[in-house]
Image: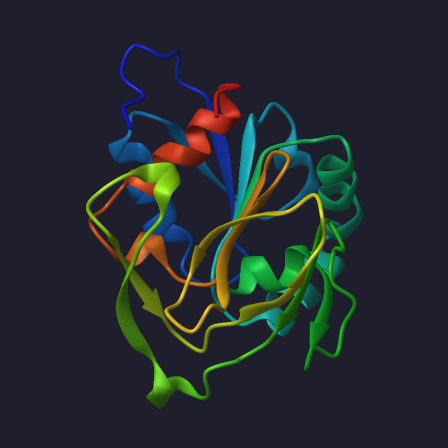
Amino acid sequence: MSTRGIRAKKIGVLAQQGAFSEHIALLRRLDVEAFPVRLAKELEGLDGLVIPGGESTTIGKLMKEYGLTEPVRGLAKEGFPILGTCAGMILLAKRVSGLNLEPLGAMDIEVKRSAFGRQVDSFETDLEIPVIGEPPFRGVFIRAPFIERAGDGVEILARLPNGVGVAARQGNMVALAFHPELTNDPRLHAYFLGIVHGGR
């Protein structure tokens, strides 16, 4: 999916903790202005936001400490484009098993945290994701969640062979259980940019 010829947008990447620099680098490869976001005032003027992977409890606590929780929750309610990966999926969810803080509740999904086990149980697998076409996307799962339940307004974009949902879209929000920023494949970021630009 190409973004060539489309006016560059400004995408913020929450930079409290986690793999934010990898997201910024990949977005810049797609000729997008990408910036780290650590303070609420840095949300101003953005066209989209990425909540990266990392430690969901730590990111959630830092978001609250730096006054980002309510502004991001408000943006989600307004239909602002948000991409959440791994910990970002957890924080976007309505309900989370095994999380000792309140998530943003932006997406009508119920997520199981660290669903596949500990760090040593990390794995990679090829995923069929029809919205980005062929070939399959290499999913990197690191202490990853999965979707236990999804509401009627949620589109499941990818499943593991056992049927478990690992990618979803609701409105302008996309949640991924894996780490696309740790691959050289830009297609999911390009898909998100298509949402930012008003495409599908």
**97 relative position to 121: left or right:** right
**75 relative position to 132: left or right:** right
Query: Residue at 74% of width from left, 55% of height from top?
Result: 104
Percent position of residue 179, x then y: 37, 60
Q: Nearer the viewer, residue 141 or 35?
A: 141
Tally of numbered tags: 0
Q: Is residue 115 above or below residue 41?
A: below
Percent position of residue 143, x then y: 45, 78
Percent position of residue 34, x then y: 41, 34
Q: Is residue 154 visible?
A: yes
Q: Quadrant of residue 73?
A: top right
Query: Residue at 46% of width from left, 73% of height from top?
Result: 144
**171 relative position to 2: left or right:** right
Query: Residue at 45% of width from left, 35% of height from top?
Result: 192
Query: How has the structure been colored for display?
Result: rainbow
Q: Is residue 44 above or below residue 95?
A: above
Q: Is residue 176 visible?
A: no
Percent position of residue 126, x then y: 25, 62
Query: Residue at 68% of width from left, 82% of height from top?
Result: 98
Give the position of the N terminus as an image quadrant: top left
Q: Nearer the viewer, residue 178 or 133?
A: 133
